Image (spheres, rainbow, N blue to C red):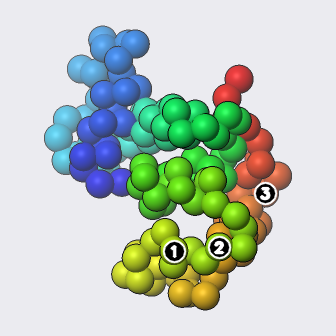
């Protein structure tokens, strides 16, 4: 997670419970602390779900949130809304594709299938209650 996303995630997660802020590792050390990182990630994924809903994805799934997490807010939402037949290269730059081990000819559906095979049945579960 990038430092901006890390900080935004922390801010989102800690907004309802600001007293926890003093219990976490501060600064760049927090990015290496498992507890602080988990809290930041939960806040970032909360942002993902809110962005998905705001864009019209009414029941975001774990897989939708993963696209947001992997590729950022705008691209993650686009991939969540994309047809499985579309190429990932329509949404993601060649350098990001390469960094994620995705070929230029891989479709959104193929990427989703690959991620789903690693996550398992939970990949299609909604993240909202």
Q: Residue 38 vs residue 95: left or right?
A: right
Foreground: disc 3 or disc 1: 1
Q: Is residue 120 above or below residue 4?
A: below
Query: Which residue is at 38% across, 42% downward?
Result: 37
Q: Earlier in the sequence, mark 3 or mark 1?
A: 1
Q: Which residue is depicted at the point 42% across and 49% down?
A: 73
For the residues bearing labels 1 and 2, Cβ distance under 8 angstroms: yes
The residue indicated by pointer 2 is 86
**Residue 47 vertical position relative to residue 17 in the rendered view, above or below:** below
User: From the image, which quarter does the C terminus lie in?
Assistant: top right
- Mark 3 and mark 1: span between their CA atoms? 26 Å
Mark seen at residue 90: 1
* Image point (58%, 33%), residue name: 53
Residue 21 visible in the displayed image = yes
Query: Upstream in the sequence, badge 3 or badge 2?
Result: 2
Distance from Cα at disc 3 to Cα at disc 2: 23 Å
Residue 36 image point, x, y percent: 36, 37
Contact check, label 3 and label 2, Cβ < 8 Å: no
Is the residue 16 above or below the residue 38 in the image?
Answer: above
Question: Seen in the image, is 113 located left or right of residue 37?
Answer: right
Could you tell me which secondary element the residue under label 3 belongs to?
Answer: loop
Q: Residue 29: image x %, image y %?
A: 22, 46
Depth check, front residue: 93 or 123: 93
SS at badge 1: helix
Tell me where residue 92 sits by quadrant: bottom left
Between 86 and 59, the residue placed more toward the observer is 86
Tag 3 residue = 120
In percent of width and height, residue 47 lies at 45, 35
Q: Is residue 45 visible?
A: no
Give the number of the mark in front: 3 or 2.
2
With respect to residue 77, does 26 lie above or below?
Answer: above
């Amino acid at each position: 997670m990038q430092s901006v996303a890390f900080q935004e995630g922390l801010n989102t997660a800690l907004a309802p419970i600001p007293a926890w802020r003093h219990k976490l590792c501060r600064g760049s050390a927090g990015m290496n602390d498992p507890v602080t990182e988990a809290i930041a990630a939960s806040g970032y994924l909360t942002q993902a779900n809110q962005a998905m809903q705001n864009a019209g994805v009414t029941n975001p799934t774990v897989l939708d949130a993963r696209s947001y997490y992997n590729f950022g807010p705008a691209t993650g939402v686009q991939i969540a809304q994309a047809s499985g037949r579309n190429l990932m290269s329509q949404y993601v730059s060649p350098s990001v594709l390469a960094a994620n081990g995705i070929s230029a000819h891989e479709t959104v559906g193929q990427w989703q299938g690959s991620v789903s095979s690693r996550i398992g049945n939970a990949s299609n579960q909604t993240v909202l209650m």
